[in-house]
Image (tube, helix red, strand yellow):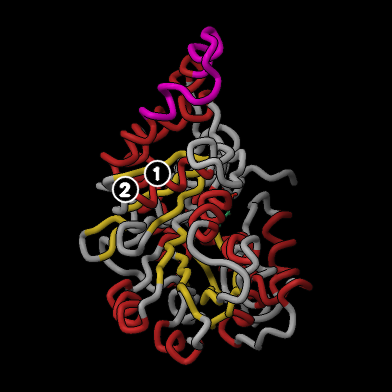
Amino acid sequence: MSINIPFGRPQIDNHEKLAVLDVMDGTQYVHGEKNKEFERKFCEYTGAPYAVAVANATAAMHLFWYTQVGPGDEVICPAMTHVATAHAISYTGATPVFVDCELRTGNIDPALVESAITENTKGIAVVHYLGTPVDMDLILKIADKHNLLVLEDCALSLGAYFGGKHTGLWGDAGCFSFYPVKHITCAGDGGMLITRDKKLADRVRDQSSFGYKTETVGFNYRLSEMGAAVGIEQLKKSDEFLEKRRMNLSRLWTILHVHGLQTYPARLPNRGSAYALGVRTPNSTELIIKSLEKAGIEVSKYYQKYPPFWKCYQNMGYFNNACVIAALSISLPVGPHLDLDDMIRIGETVAAIMEGYK
Ligand SMILES: Cc1ncc(COP(=O)(O)O)c(C=O)c1O
């Protein structure tokens, strides 16, 4: 059977298509008004004082660390994350120091952060895993005590708040991804850095475009005007997308729990952005994923190959909870492309497959 419930599907209509055509009819394909407007709208949406649009979230994180750390420095990094969180640190010559995650959320375990700090530690990276915010009060308490920078990887947390403040506004900066199946997309890659610090925003903007202003070594990490035009249209619909995700997640959560299945992240009222719903599997996920695909349901593994698993980060410690999540869990789709019938089908199919392994 072919996949008829994909994990994600970009939600594009004529608004995005016309916005792209409009840019193409002009002559300004980079460095234009669409980027400025996207940044302004993103500030309005998140409450950020400053935003810099860039090519993708990895570029945004790289630019942040590039302006702050270098060889010999260490940055605390969650073991359970996309490898991009760690790569962005490594690009600068600094070393990511991995810390295990909590089983109930998949987020970095704040209780383990302090013991990983050395005299070389300059910062902490956190990831709001599957859209559930990290307890930023605990992280900032540690950061303040040791005078450390904090970067929030918000690739999965658009629309997620902690303590009434949007994720990305607690640390020194927050970085968002608009990769095709994220909460919103730029119809290709796209990213945004938000910050409360004007100097940092100016520096990141300059470094994202060759370092022209300061005549320093910079990068070409620009977002195209077409990408920004799509991002503006998507942002208008983001609350609607998020509402659908939350509703789908709630329905699926209920069905799975009726069947006695264990899910994560733990549900925290009014905080998450419901990127996906994780479910624990009784044994290796491979056969279960195959059975689901046979039934036409595509699932994901966030993140099966978490960074300490990579050759380039080997021998940097053993992380039990990250290992358990990677080996014994799958992420189920709850995106705005799906409805109640899809949730029932996913929930009942997962339950029937798991029953076969009891
Ligand atoms: C937590 C996390 N960080 C970073 C990234 C990389 O984002 P981008 O592809 O926009 O560079 C991803 C992508 O899936 C992610 O899930």
Secondary structure beneath dot 2 equals: helix
Residue toward you, 190 or 172:
172
Discs 2, 1 touching: Cβ within 8 Å: yes
Q: Is residue 71 left or right of residue 12?
A: right
Amino acid under label 2? Lys
| Alpha carbon distance from label 2 to label 1 | 6 Å
Q: Quadrant of the C terminus?
A: bottom right
Secondary structure beneath dot 1 equals: helix
Q: Quadrant of residue 303?
A: bottom right
Q: Main secondary structure of the magenta part?
A: helix
Q: Is residue 215 left or right of residue 251?
A: right
Query: Is 104 a magenta residue?
Result: no
Amino acid under label 1? Asp
Residue at 49% x, 42% y: name it: 214
Work out which residue is located at the far bottom of the displayed protein and give it: 115
Residue bounds of the magenta highlight: 20-37
Q: Is residue 41 left or right of residue 309?
A: left
Work out which residue is located at the far top of the displayed protein and give it: 25
Residue under label 2, please give it.
198
Query: Is 35 a magenta residue?
Result: yes
Quick check: 160 above or below 352? Answer: above
Residue at 64% x, 52% y: name it: 297
Return the x and y of residue 15 as percentages of the image width and height.
43, 20
Return the x and y of residue 30 as percentages of the image width and height.
54, 24
Residue at 50% x, 57% y: name it: 67
Work out which residue is located at the far front of the displayed protein and give it: 215
Q: Where ligand 1 lies, by image quadrant? A: bottom right
Counting other residues with Cα less than 10 Å from the Cα at mark 1, is it few (<14), some (14-19), or many (20 or more)? Answer: some
Residue at 35% x, 69% y: name it: 267
Return the x and y of residue 262 as percentages of the image width and height.
48, 77
Residue under label 1, please give it.
202
